[in-house]
Amino acid sequence: MAIGDISLTSGMRSNLLSLQGTAKSIDQTQNRLSSGKRVNTPLDNPTNYFAAQGHVERASDLAVRKDGMAEAIQMVKAADTGIKGITSLIESAKGVATAALATSDTNERSTYSATFNTLLNQVSMMASDSGYRGINLLTNGSQTVEFGQRTNASTLQITGFNATAAGLTMQSAVATAWSASGNSAINSSSSELESALSFLRTKSSALSANLSAVTTRQDFTNSMINNLQTGADNLTLADTNEEGANMLMLQTRQNLGITSLSMASQAAQAVLKLF
């Protein structure tokens, strides 16, 4: 039907336009109440919409990095657990060497030598068993931890070392060397154990520093994600109390508009009374 086919009075047209505007405002308010946002599309507020999108995308990129940081922390913890176990084995080996020095019996020293070798084998096996997710920091493994939003923009390289008996330069004891007259060989083994313990402490300290760095970056990333999400919300979220009040006022205005339109139409209806 063409616009000019039906003629409306000025009052009716004015009330109709007002009702259409009120209905549009009600739809907008309902959308804000249902979504909880006052900015849902670029048409609502282009500046705030795209700024909020940028915050959300950056927060999402950082959230991906959190998984890598969490895995790196567990990897370092696995290595630390291995170091503690290896340290305990080495201290036990020191006790065996001390006990061997306390006796001159050839058979006893031979037994101590075998026990010493067993402990060193366990050191190597424990080092090999200290990997996490295919990476073992105690067998020269390494891992690059990503922190930044862009690849290789902000990283930390965690470098492992060789914690096997060979890597710690601990030689197996030979029964003949630990004979009744083999005090020098036993003392040499004890010296190697001391050097290995000192080396482990140094490497453990380095891993602890890496763990501290990753943990700090993890906390920083969590805080940054929260800040970005809060910033995006501040740009887009609606005040539900205000929107609820707006809805009540708009509904009242709509009812008044319908009543006003009815009253405006009465002038045209009065013509029917002439017949």
Image (cartoon, helix red, strand yellow):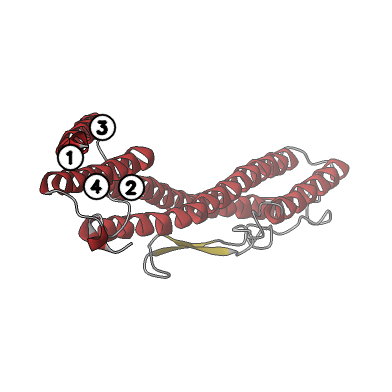
Q: Amino acid at mark 1?
A: Val
- Residue 126 is situated, as x and y percent measured from the top left of the image, at 71, 50
Q: Earlier in the sequence, mark 3 or mark 4?
A: 4
Q: Earlier in the sequence, mark 1 or mark 4?
A: 4
* Residue at image coords 33%, 37%: 33
Q: Earlier in the sequence, mark 1 or mark 3?
A: 3
Inspect this view and state whether residue 203 appears.
Answer: yes
Describe residue 141's horizontal placement relative to residue 240 as left or right: right
Q: Is residue 150 shown above or below 83?
A: below
Q: Which mark is residue 89?
A: none
* Residue at image coords 46%, 52%: 66
Label 3 vs label 4: CA separation? 12 Å
Q: Which residue is mark 2?
A: 229
Inspect this view and state whether residue 237 appears.
Answer: no
SS under mark 1: helix
Q: Amino acid at mark 3?
A: Gln
SS under mark 2: helix
How many marks the image carries: the answer is: 4
- Residue 236 is situated, as x and y percent measured from the top left of the image, at 27, 48
Q: Is residue 55 shown above or below 150?
A: above
Q: Which mark is residue 251?
A: 3
Q: Which residue is mark 1?
A: 271
Quadrant of the image for the N terminus?
bottom left
State the residue lying farthest toward the front: 275
- Please report contact status of discs 3 and 4: CB closer than 8 Å, yes or no: no
